Image (cartoon, rainbow, N blue to C red):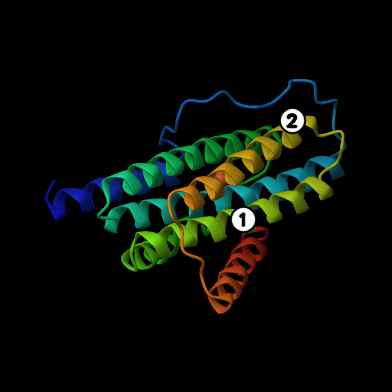
């Protein structure tokens, strides 16, 4: 594939992702159908959490695509693309749940996609070890973030809880797979900056 073809393909994937038309790994929507009727406050809280998670999954998808775009090792590349497809599953679930709760997605999602693709390509260009180190650290931070959401969500919202728990398991697997594939640990400063960027993204996506 020529560079031009690769770029066109990435634009296509970006547009499909942002219009919620990209398919992932076709896994089933992990809800229980046992959610009791939720109060307005419970719905409002869950929809705010899922709106933030949707933005996060847009970013996760773009990070993986950016890393895969510059990756030279075919095995690592396949790993990145597969993990990215699982992020698409998360994105589909978050969007579906957000719709069920009557919420709206952040209008900043295209900006998160573009920024995250660039960040992913940057880390990818540092070589496979650093690129996988970036995956491992990102996923570990996402697991912590999802745990906070699991603490906050109403225990009545069993459907949202089921989605959050499935995502937490996948993110944990993504971190472990990156480590098994030879991730190199990032510096403390880099990890801190990543944490700040994630915080900026989650706090603005909750409102805009
Ligand atoms: Fe995810
Ligand atoms: Fe992940």
Q: Earlier in the sequence, mark 1 or mark 2?
A: 1
Numbered disc 1: secondary structure: helix
The x and y percentages for residue 93 are: 59, 34
At 41% from the left edge and 52% from the top edge, which residue is drawn?
64
The reply to whether residue 29 is in sight is: yes
> In the picture, which quadrant includes the C terminus?
bottom right
Where residue 140 is drawn, which disc sits there?
Answer: 1
The x and y percentages for residue 43 are: 79, 40
Where residue 26 is drawn, which disc sits there?
Answer: none
Mark 1 or mark 2: which is in front? Answer: 1
Q: How crowded is mark 2: few (under 14 residues within 10 Å), some or many (20 or more)?
A: some
Please give left or right for residue 10 compared with residue 33 in the image: left
Looking at the picture, tell me which residue is in the foreground, 117 or 183.
183
Which residue is under mark 2?
159
Q: Distance between the residues labelled 1 and 2?
A: 23 Å
At 35% from the left edge and 48% from the top edge, which residue is drawn?
76
């Amino acid at each position: 594939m020529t560079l031009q073809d690769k770029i066109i393909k990435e634009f296509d994937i970006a547009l499909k992702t942002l219009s919620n038309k990209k398919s992932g790994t076709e896994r089933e929507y992990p809800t229980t159908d046992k959610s009791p009727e939720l109060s307005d406050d419970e719905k409002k809280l869950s929809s705010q959490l899922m709106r933030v998670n949707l933005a996060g999954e847009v970013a996760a998808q773009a990070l993986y695509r950016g890393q895969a775009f510059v990756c030279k090792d075919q095995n690592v590349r396949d790993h990145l693309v597969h993990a990215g497809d699982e992020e698409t599953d998360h994105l589909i679930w978050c969007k579906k749940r957000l719709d069920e709760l009557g919420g709206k997605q952040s209008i900043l999602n295209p900006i998160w996609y573009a920024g995250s693709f660039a960040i992913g390509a940057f880390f990818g260009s540092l070589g496979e070890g650093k690129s996988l180190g970036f995956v491992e650290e990102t996923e570990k931070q996402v697991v912590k973030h999802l745990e906070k959401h699991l603490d906050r969500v109403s225990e009545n919202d069993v459907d949202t809880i089921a989605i959050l728990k499935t995502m937490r398991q996948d993110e944990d697997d993504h971190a472990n797979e990156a480590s098994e594939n030879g991730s190199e640990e990032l510096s403390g400063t880099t990890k801190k900056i990543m944490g700040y960027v994630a915080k900026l993204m989650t706090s603005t996506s909750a409102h805009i």
